[in-house]
Image (spheres, rainbow, N blue to C red):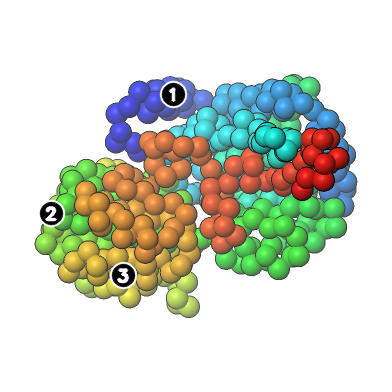
Amino acid sequence: MFSSKNNDNEHVRSIIDDLLNQYNNELSLNSIVCSGYQQNEEVKEKDSFLFDEVDDAVGAAVKAQQELVKCSLANRAEIIGAIREKIRVNIPMLVRMELDETGYGRYEDKVAKHLLTINKTPGVEDIKPEVYTGDDGLTLIEKRAYGVACCVLPSTAPSCTPIHNGICMVAAGNSVVFSPHPGGKNTTYAVLELMNEAVREAGGPPNIFVSTKEATIDKANEMMQHPKIDLLVATGGPGVVKAILSSGKKAIGAGPGNPPVLVDETADIPKAAMDIIAGNSFENCIQCNGEKECLVIDSIADLLIGEMQKNGAYLIKDMTMIDKLTDLVTTDKGGVNRKYIGKDAKIILKDIGITVGDEIRTIIYEVPTDHITVMEEYLMPLLPIVRVKNVDEGIEKAVYIEGRRRHSAVLHSRDVHTITEYAKAIQTTILVKNGPSFAGVGYGGEGYATMTIAGPTGEGLTRPKSFTRETRCALIKEFNVRSGAR
């Protein structure tokens, strides 16, 4: 969680504590179900925003978008405000539902992530027009809607991603056909029901957010290829990003990362250790921007490791046990063992014969650069540590490990030259300096929040204006035309 002590973070922490107290006082999924949704239930026939056929879903979204663009920006702001508040009062239910359905992450971290999403996702203020005036007249640049978007969702954030995408799309004037991940579809359906309820209560059109009753690859492909889908947004792995980029439509893709963190001799070592473990263990490292491996200058490595152990890291020293851990989390074909994605560190350790308490949040161990858990993104609370001789070697290896994914990276250093050189070399969408990785998306850091980090297609941290197209309207002064001015 956060180590920062500013007032905003203390306020967020107090809200999280209140919600956790509610949960501990028997606020369960069954007591706050959303219009009949419960874990593992089949989709109800009465849910009008869910359709049997993709064509029907898209058709409903087209009608909704035609009404939405008639709404003023003030109307859209009211709708977005209603969505934020509707989600806010249902956070405990959504968090519990997501945790039960996916098995990924931690309850308190999911609460924090939902609060971040509803509080710091931008709204209509992000699409204000730009105006240029001068002797030659007036030029207005407006952000206009694409139309109907198809948003493909990940299993790692089946609630926060549609909330973020939904707020952004309403601000931009788009309706959305959502393609849920099969592993998180029930949670996504509950979110869509809540958001549609909020839209209706705010006086907006029905079916701004729609989906299909089946969440399958075939349905997703049909959505992406539908002629009335104007914009594709995918948050997930390389496969889905490749699929949208080959669609021939405007596509925004948020692909995987493998963020390295580099620590040099000038860093505040106790703070660096605390921040790194906080970032790596947040949601059990299912976030693509979380620290996935640590590069540290050899002369301070032992000190950093010792401080990490004070902050909830369990150190495996024996190479035989490191190999056992690697074999556990890796399949025979060299892929990630999905059984352990997003699981608590103590569960992973238990399965290699090590018993620890709840205070352990991350597993650390030393390996060479080419170790598979260094080079591949595992989405687990694992933090392989690689020693380097100096900053130059550290930067070179960080770039190699990040693999030109252009996603995220972290640095702990108080040397301006190191900070500059690392930034120039790594060229990631997010670069966090002297803080935990989640500060890069506004959690304990400045700036807006996002759940769709579009590195492969270059939009970066998506926001409402990411889902608009620009119209340039130039009004020329009449006397300039008559005088032949150009």
Which is nearer the N-term, disc 2 or disc 3? 2
**Residue name at image x 33 percent, y 65 percent:** 398
| Element at label 3 | helix
Q: On the image, numbered disc 3 is attached to which residue?
A: 396
Mark 2 vs 3: CB contact within 8 A: no
Q: Name the kind of residue labelled 2 in the image.
A: Leu
Q: Nearer the viewer, mark 2 or mark 3?
A: 3
Q: Percent from the top left, x then y, of residue 97?
A: 57, 39
Q: On the image, numbered disc 2 is attached to which residue?
A: 303
**Residue name at image x 59 percent, y 42 percent:** 463
Which is nearer the N-term, disc 3 or disc 1? 1
User: What is the number of the mark on residue 476?
Assistant: none
Q: Percent from the top left, x then y, of residue 237?
A: 56, 62
Quick one: 478 or 258, which is closer to the camera?
478
Q: On the image, numbered disc 1 is attached to which residue?
A: 15
| Element at label 1 | helix
| Side of 383 where 22 appears, left or right | right
**Residue name at image x 74 percent, y 24 percent:** 75
| Element at label 2 | helix
Which is nearer the N-term, disc 2 or disc 1? 1
- Residue 174 visible somewhere in the drawing: no
Q: Nearer the viewer, mark 2 or mark 1?
A: 2
Q: Is residue 412 placed above or below 193 in the rendered structure?
A: below
Q: Is residue 157 placed above or below 220 in the rendered structure?
A: above
Point out the image quarter for the N terminus.
top left
Q: Percent from the top left, x then y, of residue 419?
A: 29, 54
Q: Name the kind of residue labelled 3 in the image.
A: Glu
